[in-house]
Image (spheres, grey):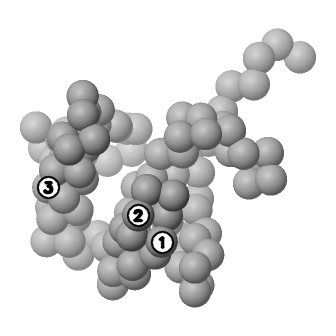
Amino acid sequence: MWNDTKNSDPERTQIMLAYTRKDAVELNKIARGYKKQASDLGEDVVLETASGKKSFSVGDRIYFLRNNRDLGVMNGTLGNIAAIEGTRLSVLVDREVFKGNK
């Protein structure tokens, strides 16, 4: 199970994938429940997103779905929410994403 692997090797990058959006919502709910129980998340802040209102917390793990040069992220970038100020999230990304040959 995801949580067992996360606990046994917390430095290793992990991601859960779902076949449908409904499945993704359910997996996120379960994962956030484990993280809240372990006190790994801060208070929930509900923000409006392109796909509706969603809860975010300091400590949440996020996955960027699009390239955004203004933010300096690419599709597939992973990170953790480090701070929430109003509607602005500060995210500590895992590492630089491969950008091809130089």
Identify residue type, mark 1: Glu
| Residue 97, quarter of picture | top right
| Residue density around tag 1, few if under 14, some if 14–19, many if 20 or more, within 10 Å | few
Nearer to us of marks 3 and 2 is 2
Say what secondary structure mark 3 lies in: helix
Image vertical order of residue 92 relative to residue 48, above or below? above
- Which is nearer the N-term, disc 3 or disc 2? 3
- Residue 99: give x, y in percent of width and height: 75, 25
Residue 59 is left or right of residue 74, and the answer is left
Question: Could you tell me if the residues under marks 2 and 1 are in contact, i.e. CB atoms within 8 Å?
Answer: yes
Say what secondary structure mark 2 lies in: strand
Question: Could you tell me if the residues under marks 1 and 3 are in contact, i.e. CB atoms within 8 Å?
Answer: no
* Label disc, if present, on residue 84 of the rendered structure: none
Image vertical order of residue 19 relative to residue 44, above or below? above
- Residue 17: give x, y in percent of width and height: 29, 32
Identify residue type, mark 3: Ile
Q: Is residue 84 visible?
A: yes
Residue 2 is left or right of residue 43, and the answer is left
Q: Is residue 7 visible?
A: no
Distance from the alpha carbon under mark 1 to that under mark 3: 21 Å
At a point 13% along the width and 71% down the height, the residue shown is 37
Identify residue type, mark 2: Gly
At a point 43% along the width and 56% down the height, the residue shown is 51
Q: Which residue is mark 1?
A: 48
- Which is nearer the N-term, disc 1 or disc 3? 3
Q: Which quadrant: the C terminus?
A: top right
Residue 65 is left or right of residue 54, and the answer is right
Nearer to us of marks 1 and 3 is 1
Q: Which residue is mark 3?
A: 30
As rendered, which of 22 and 38 lies closer to the eye?
22
Q: Which residue is mark 2?
A: 52
